[in-house]
Image (cartoon, rainbow, N blue to C red):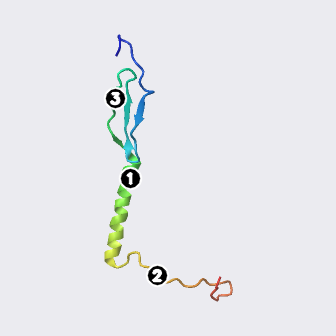
């Protein structure tokens, strides 16, 4: 503080946020010293990470049981007449 008055410094800031969470650094216009806020993890990122982890577990379990992403042969689509269409 300079002379007992508040100095506005919010115009000189840096956004350090990512998809994982939020963090900001504020710099003083007079002395250029900075203050970095603590990192706050995004709640949606946490949930997404949980579901991605569950998906990986399910994929591994499927692979181990032999029912993983196996390609199945495609049958030709049946047309209106009940015969296989070539289009």
Query: Looking at the figure, which quarter contains the N terminus?
Result: top left
The x and y percentages for residue 46 are 36, 50
Q: Earlier in the sequence, mark 3 or mark 2?
A: 3
Q: Which residue is mark 3?
A: 34
Instruction: Give the spatial CA distance, label 3 vs label 2.
Output: 59 Å
Labels 3 and 2 touching (C-beta < 8 A) = no
Instruction: Give the spatial CA distance, label 2 vs label 1.
Output: 32 Å
Residue 69: quadrant of the picture: bottom left
Q: Is residue 5 left or right of residue 78?
A: left
Q: Which residue is mark 1?
A: 47
Which residue occupies the foreground of this view, 70 or 15? 15
The x and y percentages for residue 42 are 38, 45
Q: Which residue is mark 2?
A: 72
- Estimate how packed mark 2 is, as few (under 14), some (14 to 19) or many (20 or more) residues with alpha carbons within 10 Å: few
Residue 56: quadrant of the picture: bottom left
Residue 40: quadrant of the picture: top left
Labels 3 and 1 touching (C-beta < 8 A) = no
Which residue occupies the foreground of this view, 5 or 12? 12
Q: Residue at x 35, y 73 (%)?
A: 62
Q: Is residue 63 left or right of residue 71?
A: left
The x and y percentages for residue 2 are 35, 14
């Amino acid at each position: 503080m300079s002379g007992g008055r508040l100095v506005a410094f919010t115009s000189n800031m840096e956004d350090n946020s990512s998809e994982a969470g939020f963090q900001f650094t504020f710099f003083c216009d007079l002395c250029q010293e900075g203050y970095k806020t603590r990192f706050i993890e995004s709640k949606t990122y946490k949930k997404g990470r949980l579901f991605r982890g569950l998906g990986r577990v399910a994929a591994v379990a499927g692979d181990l049981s032999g029912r993983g992403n196996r390609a199945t042969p495609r049958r030709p689509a049946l047309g209106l007449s009940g015969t296989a269409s070539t289009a």
